[in-house]
Image (tube, grey):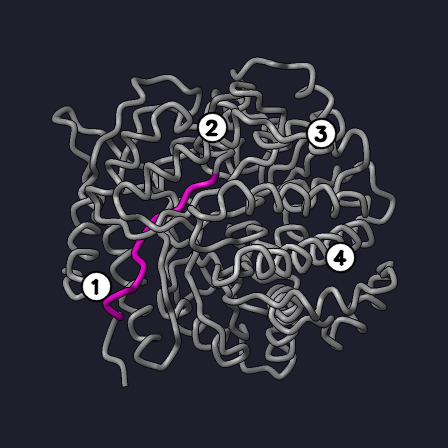
Amino acid sequence: MKNGFDDNFLWGGAIACSQADGGFLEGGKGISTQDLRYLDPAWNHEQVEEKHHNSPFSKAEFDQALKDMDTTYYPNRRGIDFYHHYKEDIALFHELGMKIFRTSICWSRIYPNGDDEMPNKEGITYYKDMFQECKKYGMKIFATILHYDIPVNLVLKYGGWKNRKAIDFYVRYAKTLFEELGDLVDYWLPFNEFNAGRFAPWDGVCLIQDEEENMNQSIFQCLHHQFIANAKTVALCHEMLPGSKIGGMIARFETYPATCRPEDALQAMQDQQYSNWFYTDIMARGVYPAYMDRYFDMFDIDIQFEDGDDEILKAGIVDFLSFSYYFSQVSTNSQTWEKTAGNLIMANKNPYLETSEWGWQKDPIGLRISLNQMYDRYGLPIIIAENGLGTGDVLEKDGKIHDPYRIDYLKTHIEQMKEAIIDGVEVIGYTMWGIIDIVSCGPLTMDKRYGVIYVDLDNGGKGSGKRYKKDSFYWYQKCIATNGKELG
């Protein structure tokens, strides 16, 4: 029986290019779908929540964003300027002791329009240089091929993932990455949070709700095209880069029956199937699960398959699984149950859990349960691709940031990760989300901070941009140095 983390356990951190890089239109980069997301820095917390949690991305917003080519109201165009500061940031990651760095590659930096005949050499050089900087410090690379942002031209010209042509454009993009960066990347991930397509359609599958007659039909047709692209990319990676590892990822929605009523237990089972297992079943087993037939019939969804799609899915089974984990919820068929916020969704509130400043419920034991459930179901190695606490931090006059709340969150979740390993789960890595403060994906603000490294920028992009080590930096540094033995 294992009693803790293996000596080769991969402690690390994660960011996304759209939330960190900046460098808008620099180095030959094209416009991506994440470049179009709008934030007014004057909005208060309630206005931000109302806009980004309750209002889908609209055609009016899309058209306006394409006209506005500055960065004032578009935080993802600024990020934290990682594009120009990656060397000093990676040096901080090395000082922290990170063994693996998860980041995403920007499709529109490699193929600015998505359908270009040739890739952008400047974009390839940027990633080669950045990954080599990591390798200089002995850091492994966990590369996400698509973290929500596709070239906006693919939406304008083809309808994005609604069009099956997107599969070929994506696979060609992935092939270019394997050719140019294959010797530098240790773990590949074709799609971030695959189930985001259903819960955040603009992020996940680039759909504009007021342009769709049947949103559910469009979402699941887009998802099918992504599943085919995923499977083709997995097979291509196995062919081109034998020995490399390529996996699948979801946003993990752990849920419990709200009561012991059989109806709530049934709802919890179905929520697990429809929100979690559907996606991992296809990626890890290569087939559409039978339980989805009833769901598709219920919502009048008719997915168009082409000849050979079943074989493509079976031939593209992943090597490992990963997920983001931030919170848990409860399942009930009651329409009056109290709601609270969560990653990508509004969740049914669990009265036994504490909530964060942003309303997300803290549930370390839920991480252990999630790990056990996923490993029991598939028997594949698991990387926790995202986990962390988004909350406000205060930069003191002496340059210090005291964040005991973040240390407590990380400590309790890592303790439960260790318990899952003792349970027998093969957890091989942990890449803490937002290892350095970045633009938060949901609200698009800087004041919802995840990092152990503070970045002096506000919601409008004003500030010195200087990096500061939080108290949690030194705590995580010790955790890594002792391989999870010292968590006090």
Q: Amino acid at mark 4?
A: His
Mark 1 vs 4, N-terminal side: 4
Q: What's the CA distance linking mark 3 and mark 1?
A: 46 Å
Residue depicted at x 39% and y 46%: 14
Q: Position of residue 98 (x, y in %)?
A: 27, 49
Tag 4 secondary structure: helix
Q: Which residues are magenta?
A: 6-16
Assess whether mark 4 and mark 1 are in contact (beta carbons under 8 angstroms): no
Q: Which residue is mark 3?
A: 116
Q: What's the CA distance linking mark 4 and mark 3?
A: 24 Å
Which disc is residue 484 wearing? 1
Q: Which residue is mark 2?
A: 44
Tag 1 secondary structure: loop
Q: Position of residue 427 (x, y in %)?
A: 38, 69
Q: Which residue is mark 4?
A: 224
Please name which of the two marks, 2 or 4, marks the residue nearer to the observer.
4
Quadrant in which the C terminus is drawn: bottom left
Crowd band around label 4 with a 10 angstrom C-alpha radius: few (<14), some (14–19), many (20+): many
Crowd band around label 2 with a 10 angstrom C-alpha radius: few (<14), some (14–19), many (20+): few
Q: Is residue 365 left or right of residue 244?
A: left
Q: Amino acid at mark 3?
A: Asp
Q: How many numbered callouts? A: 4
Q: Amino acid at mark 1?
A: Gly
Residue depicted at x 21% and y 45%: 96
Q: Is residue 136 left or right of residue 320?
A: left
Q: What's the CA distance linking mark 1 and mark 2?
A: 38 Å
Mark 2 vs 4, N-terminal side: 2
Mark 1 vs 2, N-terminal side: 2
Tag 2 secondary structure: loop
Q: What's the CA distance linking mark 2 and mark 4?
A: 38 Å
Assess whether mark 3 and mark 4 are in contact (beta carbons under 8 angstroms): no
Mark 2 vs 3, N-terminal side: 2
